[in-house]
Image (cartoon, helix red, strand yellow):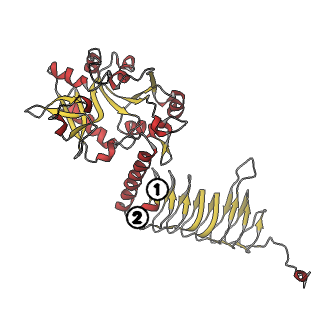
Amino acid sequence: MENNIMAIVMAAGKGTRMKSKKSKLVQKIYGKEIVKRAVENAEKAGVNEIVAVVGYMKEEVMAVLGDNVKYAFQEEMLGTGHAVMQAKEYLKGKKGKVLVLNGDVPLIRPETLNKLLEKSIENKEYATLLTAIYDNPTGYGRIVRDEGGNISAIVEEKDTTDEQKEIKEINAGIYCFDIEELLSALDKIKPNNAQGEYYLTDVIQIMNEKGLKTGAVIVEDNTEILGINNRIQLEMLTKVLQMRINTEHMKNGVTIEDVNTTYIYDDVEIGMDTVIHPNTTIKSGVEIGEDCEIGPNAYIREGCKLANKVKIGSFVEIKKAIIGEGTKVPHLSYMGDCEIGEKCNIGCGTITCNYDGLHKSKTIIGNHSFIGSNTNLVAPVTLGDETFVAAGSTITDDVPDYALAIARQRQTNKEDWNKK
């Protein structure tokens, strides 16, 4: 293995087509900023040092990425080569490989980046490109290969000849370079093109002229290399990510009745034979056991852990809830900041009153308990095992094991009152 595996993430663009007061790079896709996804993909591929090249609204991008990365600054937008030049100080004196990624391309799989790194190292290539085959390649830089199949040049759309326009293999804009040879080539690129910019793609030609070996990996799934420039593309990539995640869960034995209306965020664990009904949202970090039933119209928020055979029914929201095996929350309930034991039944309209305007407090319910409909559990409060709460109660005090809790005013009928 090489000494260093680095990454440069280009994150300096303006993104004016997003029509937003914020940088396009901090727009969220499935709850996570675009640029953060790009950086995390590099981290998952084993990169040990990441440099983000920032410019426009750099404070916003830096606030999202924090201290996990180092920063280089691009004041003028003079092309991809110019962006990478700004990170030269971090490359000097180092040996190894550096990935060059776009901060607005959030769906590249870490496995794809690993393939790029592995091919570059094993084949001793000084530049390894990620490429794709497009039936309609208009707008993309074309990959020009020689008779032996080696990459001889990358030609941007504006600089292509009529013959080169017919080439279907395109540059995905993701690269793996030898650090030392990249530094050498960056000193030689010139803005001799239709745009007057420093093209990073010229590095390939410079390396070829030196007789250095270059190569490519063709991406298997073209959706991985799609970038986001406007809200239409943001929605399209959200849909791609939705389908990617849902498909993985179905492969692992989860039934999803309607993939189009089921939104499962990253890093969710769901056991086999669990059924997800339509219009369900499950946020990141949630753990759901086997043989559970979720939805329809359920919202499973952060911090939830559901054991096996749990039912979360329609119009139920749960947050930071730990729910024991076989417990049911069938409908129209909010259970936040709570622990619920095994084989409990939570009646329709039950809510945990977990927030007093200043602090969040916890509700604990023991095993085999029954909570009647339209109950308010005012936290902090603890209910023991096998407790029974009468419908319509507002519970403010702890309930011991086996007790029946009734907290409602006695009914009074005023006869003929409505005739007045």
Task: Report the amino acid beneath label 2.
Answer: Val
Say which quarter of the image contains residue 17. top left
Residue annotated with mark 2: 254
SS for dot 2 = loop
In the image, residue 238 sits, relative to residue 190, either above or below, namely below
Residue extending farthest to the left is: 147
SS for dot 1 = strand
User: So how many labels did they put on this image?
Assistant: 2
Residue nearest the observer in this picture, 301 or 291: 301
Whether residue 224 is visible to the viewer of this picture, yes or no, is: yes
Question: What label does residue 3 carry, if any?
Answer: none
Q: Residues within 10 Å of mark 1 (few under 14, many from 20)?
A: many
Q: What distance separates the C-alpha of mark 1 from that of mark 2?
A: 12 Å
Residue nearest the observer in this picture, 316 or 59: 59
Q: Residue 161: give x, y in percent of width and height.
A: 17, 31
Residue annotated with mark 1: 264
Q: Residue 263: give x, y in percent of width and height.
A: 47, 57
Q: Residue at x 45, y 50 (%)?
A: 267
Which is nearer the N-term, disc 1 or disc 2?
2
Q: Is residue 24 left or right of residue 351?
A: left
Q: Quadrant of the N terminus?
A: top left
Residue extending farthest to the right is: 420
Q: Residue at x 53, y 61 (%)?
A: 306
Residue nearest the observer in this picture, 350 or 325: 350
Q: Is residue 266 left or right of residue 378?
A: left
Q: Residue 95: give x, y in percent of width and height.
A: 29, 21
Q: Is residue 180 left or right of residue 33?
A: left
Task: Report the amino acid beneath label 1.
Answer: Ile
Q: Is residue 160 left or right of residue 66?
A: left
Q: Residue 251: give x, y in percent of width and height.
A: 34, 60
Q: Quadrant of the C terminus?
A: bottom right
